[in-house]
């Protein structure tokens, strides 16, 4: 199992390009199930979750051609022979539950494993199922699987109890082939939702309101193929900007519109960073340690839960105290004990963590528990004195493409070891 070895103390400088967004690419790849015509997707990141998605599509009977060096995927779902997403794949990637909507909409049947637990907390899919039932689906739970069927989904008025990203994606895709209009209320507003809607419109779907709390979808009898380029990864961009900030460096991240990361940029500025926003790039510069700054994670356009762990690493070396409150996932402080091993002063109080900035952090062997925790520990290692060794970095490979190479080009002393 690979590990990451970091020798801290290097100031990061330079430019780095972000890969395509993992969280946008996954549902966009599954949207290929909605049409019998070929779809070509560009700027698809080379990540383990992408490979898992393509494996699942292949098991369903889709013809998949993957060119990782070109970040290109070609999918033909003309001859789907299987309608079951097995537990073996769903358990490794919870996002695969969004295969339910496209399968049900186009083929009238789907069998998808319940995703089960998650290291950062429960993510129930009851929102998905209740909404699909409103559209006329018959749903049963059998031996850990969701078994769904319908003749054709019917347009419906649906209000989500919570602005769930997965439920919004699942129902938006399902509604594209439904009979009549579907109105989705209290929708998630994340940029990845907008990117999925753009991809669906490239396939001929009629969708309005993406990026707002109300999305309207006029169902069509069929969709056609498309060529589409996935948006840049805003969390990857935020992570590299955080790496610049924590090392008092200057880094320009290219390939992302700044508006998608605005809540994070504002907090970086509050903590003392200088930010330059350009059309398709963001530059961060800092010549002194950050200031203690409070954050609360909330759905987009607020501060994203996927940047909470990285921001905590910055606050661990800040001047003064800060409070970080996590409202999205109940177990998303699993990186805290590992940051404490580096010397961070952090106290957890329910949903909040009190961080008293301290320097220096001292390198130590660490254990990653999830994707964003891995990024947080990497940031800690970049600023810690001595050597930090991070175990179980397979989590990192789920969401960051060649992170160690990109950090090295910015001046970090980091390497992957077997």
Image: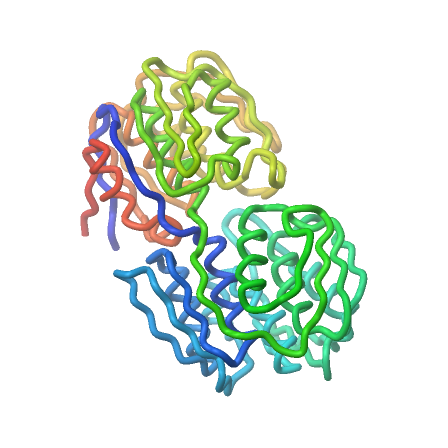
Quarter that holds the N terminus? bottom left
Q: Is residue 4 above or below residue 247?
A: below
Please state the horizontal and vertical placement of residue 221, each as a whole percent of the image: 67, 78
Please state the horizontal and vertical placement of residue 371, each as a whole percent of the image: 42, 47
Closest to the observer: 30 or 279? 279
Image quadrant assignment for residue 125: bottom right
Left or right placement of residue 122 versus residue 213 in this view: left
Image quadrant assignment for residue 237: top left
Image quadrant assignment for residue 75: bottom left
How many numbered marks, from 0 up?
0
The image's colour scheme reads rainbow
Left or right placement of residue 364 versus residue 336 in this view: left
Please state the horizontal and vertical placement of residue 94, each as a whole percent of the image: 52, 60
Closest to the observer: 78 or 107? 78
Q: Residue at x 64, y 81 (%)?
A: 109
Left or right placement of residue 230 versus residue 302 in this view: left
Q: Residue at x 71, y 49 (%)?
A: 162
Closest to the observer: 223 or 401? 223
Q: Residue at x 44, y 66 (%)?
A: 227
Please state the horizontal and vertical placement of residue 31, each as a whole percent of the image: 54, 68
Q: Residue at x 60, y 57 (%)?
A: 166
Q: Is residue 164 above or below residue 363?
A: below
Q: Is residue 17 above or below residue 221?
A: above
């Amino acid at each position: 199992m690979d590990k990451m070895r970091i020798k801290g103390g290097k100031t990061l400088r330079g430019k780095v390009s972000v890969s395509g967004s993992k969280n946008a690419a996954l549902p966009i790849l599954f949207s290929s199930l909605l049409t019998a015509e070929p779809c070509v997707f560009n700027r698809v990141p080379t990540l383990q979750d992408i490979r898992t998605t393509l494996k699942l599509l292949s098991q369903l009977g889709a013809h998949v051609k993957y060119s990782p060096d070109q970040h290109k995927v070609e999918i033909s779902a003309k001859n789907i022979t299987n309608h079951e997403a097995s537990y073996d794949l769903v358990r490794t990637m919870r996002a695969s539950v969004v295969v339910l909507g496209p399968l049900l909409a186009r083929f009238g049947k789907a069998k998808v494993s319940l995703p089960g637990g998650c290291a950062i907390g429960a993510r129930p899919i009851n929102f998905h199922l209740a909404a699909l039932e409103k559209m006329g689906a018959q749903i049963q739970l059998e031996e850990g699987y969701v078994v769904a069927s319908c003749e054709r989904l019917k347009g419906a008025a649906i209000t989500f109890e919570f602005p769930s990203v997965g439920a919004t994606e699942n129902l938006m895709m399902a509604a594209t082939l439904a009979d009549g209009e579907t109105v989705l209320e209290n929708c998630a507003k994340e940029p990845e939702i907008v990117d999925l809607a753009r991809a669906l419109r490239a396939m001929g779907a009629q969708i309005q309101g993406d990026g707002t709390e109300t999305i309207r979808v006029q169902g069509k009898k069929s969709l056609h193929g498309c060529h589409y380029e996935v948006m840049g990864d805003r969390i990857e961009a935020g992570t590299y900007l955080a790496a610049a900030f924590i090392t008092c460096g200057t880094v320009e991240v290219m390939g992302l519109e700044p508006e998608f990361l605005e809540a994070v940029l504002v907090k970086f500025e509050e903590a003392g960073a200088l930010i330059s926003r350009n059309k398709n790039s963001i530059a961060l510069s800092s010549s002194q340690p950050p200031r203690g700054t409070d954050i609360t994670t909330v759905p987009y356009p607020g501060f994203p839960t996927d940047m909470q762990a990285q921001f905590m690493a910055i606050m661990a070396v800040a001047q003064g105290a800060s409070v970080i409150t996590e409202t999205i996932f109940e177990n998303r402080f699993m990186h805290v004990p590992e940051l404490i091993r580096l010397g961070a002063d952090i106290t957890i109080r329910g949903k909040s963590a009190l961080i008293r900035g301290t320097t220096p952090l001292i390198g130590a062997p660490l254990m990653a528990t999830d994707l964003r925790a891995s990024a947080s520990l990497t940031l800690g290692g970049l600023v810690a004195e001595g050597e930090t060794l991070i175990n179980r970095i397979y989590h990192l490979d789920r969401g960051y493409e060649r992170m160690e190479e990109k950090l090295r080009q910015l001046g970090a002393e980091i390497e992957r070891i077997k």
